[in-house]
Structure formats: structure tokens, C-alpha cells
Amino acid sequence: MLENEKLKDSNTIIYLIGFNDLIKAIKVTDKYLNPDILETKLSAFFVVSDEELPLYRRTATWKFLKHTNHQIRINNHSKEDLANSYKESRKERTLAKKDTVMPDLTLAVSHYKKNIGRLIEICKSKDKTPIFLTQPVLWRPNISKEGDKLLNTFFSNQNNLNTKTLYKCMKVFNNALLEVCIKNDVQYIDLFAYSEEDWFYDDCHFNEQGAQKVAKTIYENIKF
């Protein structure tokens, strides 16, 4: 990532992280703690350098077929399909029984902190300044009925968590991020603390108003 030509003249890298880590830690704990490096890169980046790929993935034929398949899936995935997917997951979440007991996140948080520390090390080794944003979410202890209807986080093969418990889990991960930033004297902006219900169209993604407020919050708090 930091070797990318487009980033060579950049001085600062801003990270908004936490939600995907938390969901994976709850849903597929073993994979989160013991990730397959190649699988992780293939899921995170559209382009992965050839030297990191198996031989068959380096061929022009494979790359052409992969690109073609990607375009077909995009064209077939209409806005209507996406809307129906949201409706279904929201319905399933509404009907599902929800636990109030937090899962044990001890190992996951330790792994998360280690990864953040590694990001900081890499940035500093490349003379880049990292700035971390805590993960804001729609989850909150006293969420409104309207806000609760927008949530669609649903675990199909395990117990689901109620909104207050999800909020507590996210807070644990965000506190871990703050702890690492403070320990390493790295700048952070606590978006989690600033966030409001009207920022989101689902559990963590910003609507247009939310995106504008996030941009304004970052602008007002960032220190160069």
C-alpha cells in the first residue's frame, strides 16, 4: 500500500478502522485471530502484486476472466437487488433473538492492538504520519425506533447481540485503538464520541449528511 506510486508524495495517512475487525472477531473468531495472509490481501485489495500470487493467478487468461466476472457481477447487482438484500437482513435481525451478554473479546482486542501497532510502525518507517479515527456506529444504548429499523447486522449461524451490547463491543475496540495511539504518541480523532444517529443509513455507513459532518469534524480536529 505505502509503495503505491500515488502515495509517494503523501505525508499523512488517515485510517478509519474497527467495524470489520469487530464483526469478524465475533462472527469468525478463529479466522480473525489466524488469518490467511493471501486470502486477506485478495479480499482487501482489487490489485495484488504478482509475486504474492500463485502461478495460475499471474497469467493473463486468469486476470482477464477475473475482470470479466467482476464486471458481470457488478452489472447484475442492481440497486433494486441491494435494496431487497437490506430489507431481508433487517427483517431477519428484527425477528432474531438477541443476547445481552458480551462475547469474550480479550484475544481479538489483543490481535487488533497488535495490528494497529504494526500499521504505525510501517507508516513511521516510510516517513508517513498516521492519523486514526475511532469507528462511529449507529449502535447506541438508547437508539430511537427509527434508528433501530436501519440496522442490518445479522449473524445467521450464531446468537445475535442486541444494539446496546453491540455498542459496548464497538466501544471496547475503539478504546483499544485510543490506547495504542496514546502509547505511541499518534494523533487520533474520536469520531465514535462525536457521532449522531442521523449520520448513518445502516449500522456504520454514512448517509450524505453524515459524510459531510464527518468531513467537517475531521477538518476541525486534524493537526498537521
Image (cartoon, rainbow, N blue to C red):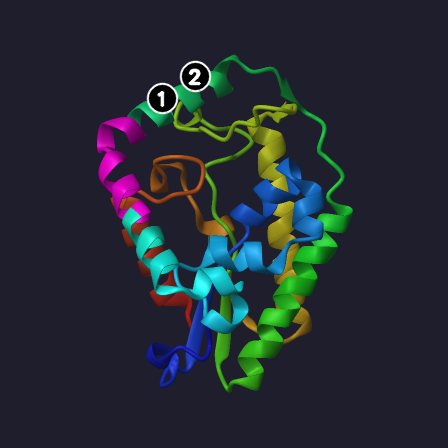
Q: Is residue 224 visible?
A: no
Q: Is residue 167 left or right of residue 112?
A: left
- Circles 1 and 2: CB distance less than 8 Å? yes
Q: Say which residue appears at 48% left-offset and 17% top-offset.
A: 92
Q: Where in the figure is residue 96, as x and y percent of width and height?
A: 56, 16
- Give the number of the disc on residue 91: 2
Is 220 situated above or below 172? below
Q: Say which residue appears at 31% left-offset and 51% top-offset.
A: 211
Q: Where in the figure is residue 70, as x and y percent of width and height?
A: 32, 47
**Residue placed under numbered mark 1 in the picture:** 87
Q: Say which residue appears at 52% left-offset and 34% top-offset.
A: 140
Q: Is residue 73 left or right of residue 170?
A: left
Is 145 situated above or below 190? above
Q: Say which residue appears at 51% left-offset and 12% top-offset.
A: 95
Which span is picked out in magenta?
69-82
Is 2 situated above or below 204? below
Asked which secondary structure carries label 1, the reply is helix
